[in-house]
C-alpha cells in the first residue's frame, strides 16, 4: 500500500492504492476516510496517470477517467458505485433513481454513496436529493457544489441525459 497527496482546487487529495491501482481518493476531513496508518508509505511519484487525469479534469479538459481502480465493499455498495459510474459528466441522478436501479431504499443508497472510496473518480458528487437538492457529501457540500459547477454546462445541453 502507498499514498500521495495531490494538490487540487478543492484542497489536497489523498490517493491510496497498490501498484498502479487506486483504491481510495480522499479529501481532508473526509467522512469515511480510513485511518492514515492504512495508507502505507508516502510515495510522491505514485499514480502518475491518475494525478495527470485529475489535473485535466480540474482544468476542464477531461470528462471521464481511465485509470485502474478497485473499490472494496459489500455487494450492495459495489452495485451502487457501479450505478454512480454510469452518471455522465454534467448530469445528476437522485438517491431515488439509484435505489430504483439497484433495488434498495434511498437511505440505504445514501449510506453506500457516503462509503464510496473513490470520490471524483467514481463521481458521487453527481448524486443529489429530490428536485436536485444538494445533500450530504463526504468531502463537504462546498466541494460538491464546486465539482457540479465545474461540470457545467448541463448534460442536456451537450445531448447527454441520464
Image (cartoon, helix red, strand yellow):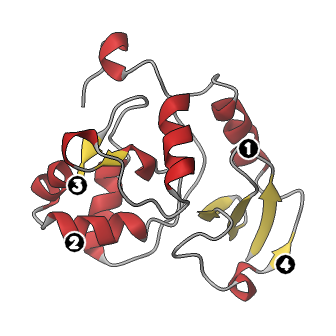
- Residue at left offset 59%, top offset 53%: 68
Seen from this angle, which residue lies furthest right? 44
Of residues 66 and 88, the one drawn nearer to the viewer in this rendering: 88
On-image quarter of the N terminus: bottom right
On-image quarter of the C terminus: top left
Examine the rendered structure and indicate whether residue 6 appears above or below residue 104: above
Is residue 120 among the parts visible in the rendering?
no
Task: Indicate which label's residue lies in the foreground, 2 or 4.
Answer: 2
**Label 2 packing within 10 angstroms: few (<14), some (14-19), many (20+):** some
- Residue at left offset 20%, top offset 40%: 131
Task: Indicate which label's residue lies in the foreground, 4 or 3.
Answer: 3
Q: Which mark is residue 95?
A: 3
- Residue 78 lies left or right of residue 116; in this view the side is left
Q: Which mark is residue 108?
A: 2
Of residues 155 and 18, the one drawn nearer to the viewer in this rendering: 155
Could you tell me residue 58's position as x and y percent? 67, 33
Q: Does the residue at mark 1 contact the one at mark 2 (Cβ under 8 Å)?
A: no
Could you tell me residue 33's position as x and y percent? 59, 76
- Compare marks 4 and 3 and give the one earlier in the sequence: 4
**What is the spatial separation of the Cα atoms under label 4 and label 1, in whole angstroms?**
19 Å
Residue with the mark numbered 1: 49
Q: Secondary structure at mark 2?
A: helix
- Residue at left offset 60%, top offset 27%: 62
Q: Which mark is residue 41?
A: 4
- Residue 104 lies left or right of residue 23; in this view the side is left
- Compare marks 2 and 4 and give the one earlier in the sequence: 4
Could you tell me residue 71's position as x and y percent? 48, 67
Amino acid at each position: 500500500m502507498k499514498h500521495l497527496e495531490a494538490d487540487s482546487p478543492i484542497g489536497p487529495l489523498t490517493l491510496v492504492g497498490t501498484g498502479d491501482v487506486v483504491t481510495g481518493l480522499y479529501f481532508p476531513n473526509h467522512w469515511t476516510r480510513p485511518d492514515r496508518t492504512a495508507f502505507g508509505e508516502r510515495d510522491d511519484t505514485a499514480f502518475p496517470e491518475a494525478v495527470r487525469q485529475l489535473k485535466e479534469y480540474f482544468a476542464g479538459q477531461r470528462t471521464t477517467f481511465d485509470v485502474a481502480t478497485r473499490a472494496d465493499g459489500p455487494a450492495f455498495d459495489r452495485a451502487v458505485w457501479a450505478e454512480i459510474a454510469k452518471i455522465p459528466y454534467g448530469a445528476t441522478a437522485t438517491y431515488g433513481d439509484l435505489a430504483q436501479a439497484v433495488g434498495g431504499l434511498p437511505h440505504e443508497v445514501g449510506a453506500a454513496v457516503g462509503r464510496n472510496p473513490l470520490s471524483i473518480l467514481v463521481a458521487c458528487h453527481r448524486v443529489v436529493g429530490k428536485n436536485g437538492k444538494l445533500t450530504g457529501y463526504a468531502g463537504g457540500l462546498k466541494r460538491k457544489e464546486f465539482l457540479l459547477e465545474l461540470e457545467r454546462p448541463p448534460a442536456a445541453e451537450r445531448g447527454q441525459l441520464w
